[in-house]
Image (tube, rainbow, N blue to C red):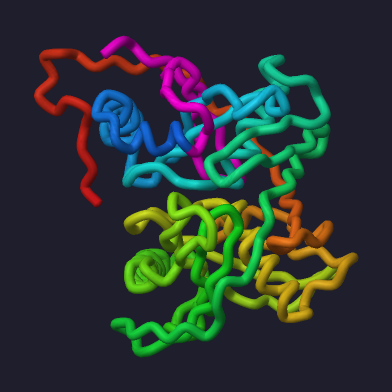
Amino acid sequence: MDDLSVVDYHTAGEPFRIVTSVEIPGTSVADRRVVAQSSPGIDAVRQLLVNEPRGHADMYGGFVVPGDDDGADFGVVFWHKDGYSTACGHGTIALATWAVETGRAEAGEVVIDVPSGRVAARVSKTGVAFRNVPSYVLSRGVRVPTARGEVTADISYGGAFYASVPASAVGLSVEPASYAELVAIGREIKWALDPVAVHPTDPRLSGLYGTILYDDLGSWAEGPHQRNLTVFADGEADRSPCGSGTSARLALLHDEGRLGPDQVLRHDSIVGTTFLGRVVSQAPEGVITEVSGNAYRTGTATFTLDPRDPLGTGFTLR
């Protein structure tokens, strides 16, 4: 394997590792995600960059690829420790920031094709605001037996499917002291409800991506105020408020009548960072949401796989 150069960002505390040197065949970003999943050679690159000792169990990143057509600046295949996701809001914010900072796109709007569709990010001096694919409520009040008793979950889509459960329903609150317990129960709920999340038109987008455990903090000056920990993949925890998860929460709040046309959701993370989210319009498939946040460059690196290294592409302990 050749040496691999990467650029690292964090968005509201969540890492994002950008790779531009991996070519993935396909006619669309959605197709390229499927190819990456089934290609041992491409997946070895993901493993090298996400596994220890070069990464960690909560690492996240993406392969920059061509867009689906000339309407996009570029596309991206998102990855994490367990595979490839259909959407990633914090990654979208990081990529838009990177594209402007490196001159790949002009300041203003950056259009990115992701596996779930096309998103547009507006980049300004104050941060990035991206408009997501349509978000909608799939089902409500789904009963889930757990180690902490039966709970009910609401499932919604924001480029990926999420199950929302109040943290109080499992006797917890979203705070660092409860981190391990939140991850354990979030993982349990995710796998229990994975078969329930069926996309109506594209089976490649089916499956429950994560569980959003949230605290309702009432209201702030402009609308609802909530704090969450999103547990996705197989026990990976988002340090940010989760961008596509914020879109999924906006769909639920809009459906409940808790988020008016001029209101903004303040969505906090377990580490105290914030995304702002709002519904900007209605589409036949659901609501169009806008999520705002900031990303910052944290470093660059060139990674090597020594052919003599017995650990190969690395390992994970979780």
Which residue is located at x 68 percent, y 67 percent?
Answer: 251
Residue 286 in the magenta stretch? The answer is no
Q: Position of residue 143 (x, y in %)?
A: 43, 86
Q: Nearer the viewer, residue 234 or 284?
A: 284
Where 87 sits versus 274, above or below? above
Q: Which residues are magenta?
A: 1-30
Q: Position of residue 278 (x, y in %)?
A: 78, 60
Q: Quadrant of the N terminus?
A: top left
Which residue is located at x 78 percent, y 20 percent?
Answer: 106
Confirm whether residue 102 shows in the render: yes
Q: Position of residue 268 (x, y in %)?
A: 64, 61
Q: Residue furthest right?
A: 262
Where 115 sits versus 314, above or below? below
Q: Residue furthest top?
A: 2
Which residue is located at x 45 percent, y 27 percent?
Answer: 26
Which image quarter: residue 76? top right
Q: Position of residue 166 (x, y in %)?
A: 53, 79
| 99 lies left or right of 91 | right
Total labels drawn: 0
Residue 6 in the magenta stretch? The answer is yes
Q: Nearer the viewer, residue 250 or 168?
A: 250
Which residue is located at x 79 percent, y 31 percent?
Answer: 109
Where 89 sits versus 315, above or below? below
| 314 lies left or right of 263 | left
Confirm whether residue 241 shows in the render: no
